[in-house]
Amino acid sequence: MEYYLQLLINGLVVGGIYSLVALGFVIIYKATQVVNFAQGELVMVGAYVCFSLTVQFNIPFVWAFLLTLGFSVLLGLLVERLALRPLIGESIISVIMVTIGLSSILRSLVQVFWGTQIKVYPQVLPVEPVVIAGLPVAPVYLAAFVLSALLFGIFSLFFKYSRLGIAMRATAFDQQAAQSMGIGIRNIFAMSWCIACVVSAVGGVILGNINGINSQLGYLGLKVFPAVILGGLDSLLGAALGGLIIGVLENLCDGLAKEFLGLSGVREVAAFVVLVVILMIKPYGLFGTEEIERV
Amino acid sequence: MTHVLKLENLEVVYNDVVLVLKGLSLAAAEGRITALLGANGAGKSTTLKAISGLLESEDGEVTAGSVLYRGRPVQGLPPERVVRMGVFQVMEGRRIFEDLSVEENLRCGAFVSPRAEYAANLDKVYGYFPRLKERRGQLAGYMSGGEQQMLAIGRAIMAKPKLLLLDEPSLGLAPLLVEEIFEIVQMINQKEGVTVLLVEQNARAALNVAEHGYIMENGRIVMEGPARDLLQNPDIQEFYLGMGHAGAKKSYREVKHYRRRKRWLG
């Protein structure tokens, strides 16, 4: 029994990270209708930058973390300005190709600067497990979960109540109409990339603290697709739940397959099986916007 | 009488090749309603977009002439700058944000106006359109066409514009609703002192509320004058108001005959 509970907790933590990365993905999609295939690479870059700052430059972790967030904002601005802005008004497929190109560039840059070896983060939080409901949980897991939940809360409020958040949703629905209200859509685009970079970097740093980092980290982005499609491409709540569900499912499936069938590696495919099933029965996802049709 | 807006010999080209406006000139008098009438494809919407800056996202460009707003050239400025100067376009087809609530739509309209004025402006909009207040929390996409048009105009009021560009507010609405909308446009014009440039296909409704009118064909102004005179003009009655020469309803059999008698060059 304890084995399964442990699987569940692992799943929730990994799922929390998926949710964060999915959040970045959904924000970009919501505001700019761009499907960002480079989301996983943004996670990786954030993780490596924070690693560099703490280990190579010996900056205390908290400061390094804040600096990483600052760097992510700049990265977001840069990516939007150089790669995405020239494509405003171009077809969806061109934009998608550009984000795929962007993902290769970012991945290669990371390999150029840091090599392909696994890097281990310094120990930031105590190793002593905290006991929750009779189960030992590593503090870093707990921190990961709380941090994800916190960011979700903040962004949900932002999109519901702030003028800028509402303007971002309006831009997502109809760019030209948004422009006619005086909403500068270029600023909105830049801003959504900044937010996406920041949340991804947070995800990357958490992951680094748990598992260490290597140049394969970018493929995490692929896992985020089942999460966002399960939740609905344009729903924040969907991203949160989608991420958690995928995280838990893949851990449980993996554990079960190991236990009863002696199979390993089920973790890698479980999420995609879910993806296919969801697309068949609920193509808008659990919380996605269906087209409004007045009759 | 001062002119808030002046277009001088405006030329607009789409996609670098299609010449849509061919030297168009018009002016809108301060605090009045000016109507711009014309058939489909005459270039009415293009004219408004050339003023508001929304041409840029459609690959359109002002290639000659000028748009003067209070004497300052605004052609080629990005739309958000133009809106901040007090020019607000209500686009054709209402273009409300369907998956936002009514009140969120209104907040978008208030994007450029000071936060301190938000509550007062919101009350004003709900005063003009009590039905929007009833439905404030509802998703805008589920409202009827008339309510959506009210919302579109309400969004404009939230921005407190000095010059309001209205693109076919009567589009797709039942006659009674058209009347209601035009009454409200008139009220906004009088109470708020907003200058209105009204683009319409419904010529009678537009000329009834407007002070001055322009008739547009093929990218040019072909006739202008006080709205009263235009309503009496036999050609206008013929081609835009659907009346025969004597002011009687005409039969479609005779349309071809009258076509040849159009007195201006298209």
Image (tube, rainbow, N blue to C red):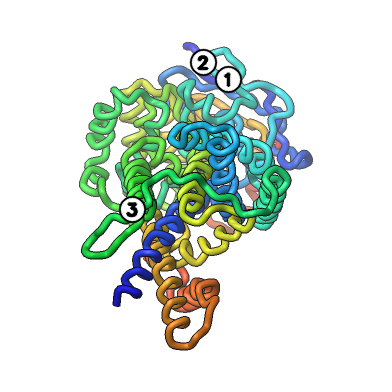
Rendered image: mark on residue A159 = none
Residue that badge 3 annotates:
A128
Viewer-nearest residue: B16 or B189 = B16
The kind of residue tagged 1 is Lys
Q: Position of residue B65 (x, y in %)?
A: 70, 22
Q: Position of residue B6 (x, y in %)?
A: 58, 20
Check the picture and name the quadrant holding the N terminus of chain A. bottom left
**Residue B161 can be seen in this image:** yes
Q: Residue at x 49, y 41 (%)?
A: A198
Asked if both marks, 1 and 3, belong to the same chain, the answer given is no
Asked if both marks, 2 and 3, belong to the same chain, the answer given is no
Q: Position of residue A57 (x, y in %)?
A: 58, 32
Front position among marks 2 and 3:
3
Alpha carbon distance from label 1 to label 3: 75 Å
Q: Residue at x 71, y 50 (%)?
A: A108
The kind of residue tagged 3 is Glu
Circle 1 crowding by C-alpha within 10 Å: few under 14, some 14–19, many from 20:
many
Image vertical order of residue B165 relative to residue B246, above or below: above
Asked if both marks, 1 and 2, belong to the same chain, the answer given is yes
**Residue A179 can be seen in this image:** no
Residue lying farthest bottom?
A: A261
Viewer-nearest residue: B11 or A95 = A95
Q: Are marks 1 and 2 in contact (CB under 8 Å)?
A: yes
Q: Position of residue A174 (x, y in %)?
A: 50, 47
Q: Chain of mark 2?
A: B
